[in-house]
Image: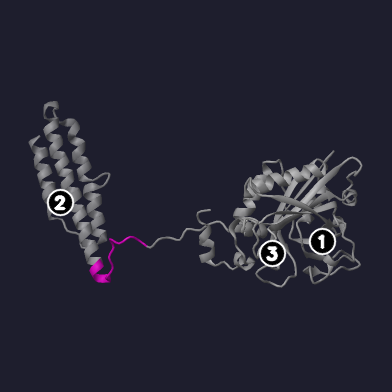
Amino acid sequence: MEQLLQQIEDIKKEITDAEAANAAALEEFRIKYLGTKGLVKQIMGEMKNVPNEQKKEFGQILNAFKIVAEEKFAALQAGLGDSAEAETGMDFSLPGDPTPVGTRHPLNLVRNQMVSIFKRLGFAVAEGPEIEDDWHNFGAMNLPEDHPARDMQDTFYVEEKTADHSAWLLRTHTSSTQARVMESQKPPIRVICPGRVYRNETISARAHCFFHQVEGLYIDENVSFADLKQTLYFFVQEMFGKEVKVRFRPSYFPFTEPSAEMDISCQICAGKGCNICKHTGWVEILGSGMVHPKVLENFGIDPEKYTGFAFGMGVERIAQLKYQVNDLRLYSQNDVRFLQQFKSV
């Protein structure tokens, strides 16, 4: 016991007299005295050989011994820090620079919410290529060759039509994904098709050469226009709240018959009238209708047995109403000041 106490005193003197001129010497001190196999650990391990009646007294001595080593290490460490500050003029006690935290893009936030709502109704997600052929983008959707949507001012053509193959283009709507689903899958079909689309538009606050859509398709036996309306009622109430008002207006689309556009009460002015709703209190958010029998026939689906509905809406329009962003260009400018506003969303 006396020999062990003398050993502790000798090591304490070593610790007290120790110096560390640099970080390497400080690390050597830590390993020698406070490391896993250091002298402090070794001495603490002798506790098992101390008689029971002396364990309390010896335990206090060991704790004091350990505190001496830890305090000396802290003092040496602080001394090195002071010298480094003196050399560099830096205060190492200051907190570090914060690391910027990213956030999801507002269009992704809105698209993900839209997908989530339709998934709860049993819609699966389908995706297709952004570079598409003429048939899947136009022909299969019952757009005749002289339809204005085929004009070069609306469509970005990658390769013109030749005698050997169809024209290739950047898809103008995600209806081309619906076409590919009908081509590869038999009814019942219930899918939504989110994705980026392209049109040859002049870029402005209200238009862009690319934007994002979410289209839906449901084909089965005995599908009615009432099913379409109830599906879209559910969507807008989940997206904008139970108080939103809805109206349908007759319209025309080559791939649906009958067709309708759907308006909701303006979320920016609460239906009172503003520049976004052109002072009508209503904003059009989507086109919809019953799938044209000719479209079903194009994919070998019997229109006498099956019916279906389709709808399509722009993600940017929904985001505009949800976040009151009035300039489409903001979504693609990567301005961090704009994107940081959606951290808490």
- In the image, what residue occupies the spot 51% across and 60% down? 341
User: CB under 8 Å between callouts 2 and 3?
Assistant: no
Judged left or right of residue 141, residue 239 is: left
* Pointer 2 residue: 15
**Between marks 2 and 3 in the image, the one whose residue lies nearer the viewer:** 3
Q: Is residue 124 visible?
A: no
* Pointer 1 residue: 133
Label 3 amino acid?
Lys
Using the rendered view, name the quadrant where residue 105 is placed.
bottom right
Label 2 amino acid?
Ile
Which stretch is magenta?
85-96
* Pointer 3 residue: 278
**Mark 1 vs 3, N-terminal side:** 1
Using the rendered view, name the quadrant where residue 86 is placed.
bottom left
Q: Is residue 170 visible?
A: yes
Label 1 amino acid?
Asp
